[in-house]
Image (cartoon, grey):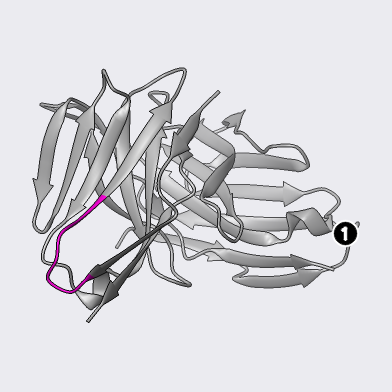
Amino acid sequence: DAGITQSPRHKVTETGTPVTLRCHQTENHRYMYWYRQDPGHGLRLIHYSYGVKDTDKGEVSDGYSVSRSKTEDFLLTLESATSSQTSVYFCAISDVLGTSGGSYNEQFFGPGTRLTVL
Amino acid sequence: GQSLEQPSEVTAVEGAIVQINCTYQTSGFYGLSWYQQHDGGAPTFLSYNALDGLEETGRFSSFLSRSDSYGYLLLQELQMKDSASYFCAVRSTNAGKSTFGDGTTLTVKP
C-alpha cells in the first residue's frame, strides 16, 4: 500500500471556525490532490499540487485553500467552515509514469477524513 | 467543462459477467481510469486506458473508444466481494487532474 495518511480522521467543528486537514505521504510522489465526496456522488476535486509551492484549483475550490511547503505534506484549509462543507475528504497522490501505451496515472488514496460542520 | 455519465446501479448474480459503461465529455483527454470503492473505504485503482482497446487485469477488463468518448469496465466471474461502487474518471491534464463520475453501485447476489 502507498504510504499516505490523513489527519485527523474524524472532526466535528462549528460554523465559522477554521479547519486544517493534513495529508502526508512517504512515497515522494510529485502530484497530490484533495477531493471531497458527498453521499451518492463521486469525488470532486478541490485543489491539486504538481510540486512544492505549485498548486491549482479544482472544480469546487471556493471556500478552500491549500499549501504545500514540502513534498510530503499537502494541507487543506477551510478558512471559515460552513455546513455545506460537511463531507468526507480524501487526499490522493500520484506520479505520471511512461509506458509503451503512453503516460500512465494511478492515484493512491488516503483513508479519508470525515468532517462535520454544525 | 467535464462531465461523465455512468449508470447509478447494477445488479448481477455470483459467477456472472457485468459491464459498467461510462461516457464522457471533456475539454482535454489523457486517459480513462476505473476505481473501486467499498462502503466506508477509500477508492482503489483498478485500470487505466490511454489508448483505444481492451486492457485486461485478471477478472477485470477495461475498454476505451476515444472516437466515441466511451469506455466500459467488464467484471467476470463475479464474486460477493465485488459488491462495491465503481467510478470512471477522466484524466484531463498531464498533471493527472481528473474528473470522476458519480459512480455505479454494483450489487452481487448469491
Give whichever of A83, A76 is nearer the camera. A83
Give whichever of B36, B71 is nearer the camera. B71
Give whichever of B47, B78 is nearer the camera. B78
Q: How many numbered discs sit on the rendered protein?
A: 1
> Which region is colored magenta?
B13-19
Which residue is at 54% across, 37% downward?
A48
Placement of B91 over or under A25, stated as above or below: above
> What residue sits right under mark 1 in the picture?
A17
Which residue is at 64% across, 73% downward?
A10
Q: Quadrant of the C terminus of chain A?
A: bottom right
Placement of B29 over or under B83, stated as above or below: above
* Left or right of residue B46: residue A7: right
Q: Residue furthest bottom?
A: B110
Answer with the quarter of the image where residue B24 lies. top left
Horizontal and vertical percent for residue B48?
24, 39
Horizontal and vertical percent for residue B28?
42, 18
Q: Quadrant of the N terminus of chain A?
A: bottom left
Label 1 element class: loop
Can you see residue A51?
A: no
Queried whether the magenta region covers residue A91, the answer comes back as no
Q: Residue furthest right?
A: A16
* Left or right of residue A102: residue A113: right
- Chain letter of disc 1 in the image: A
Horizontal and vertical percent for residue A55?
58, 31
Placement of B64 over or under A90, stated as above or below: above
Horizontal and vertical percent for residue B110?
22, 82
Can you see residue A67?
A: yes
Which residue is at 51% across, 52% downward?
A91
Label 1 amino acid? Thr
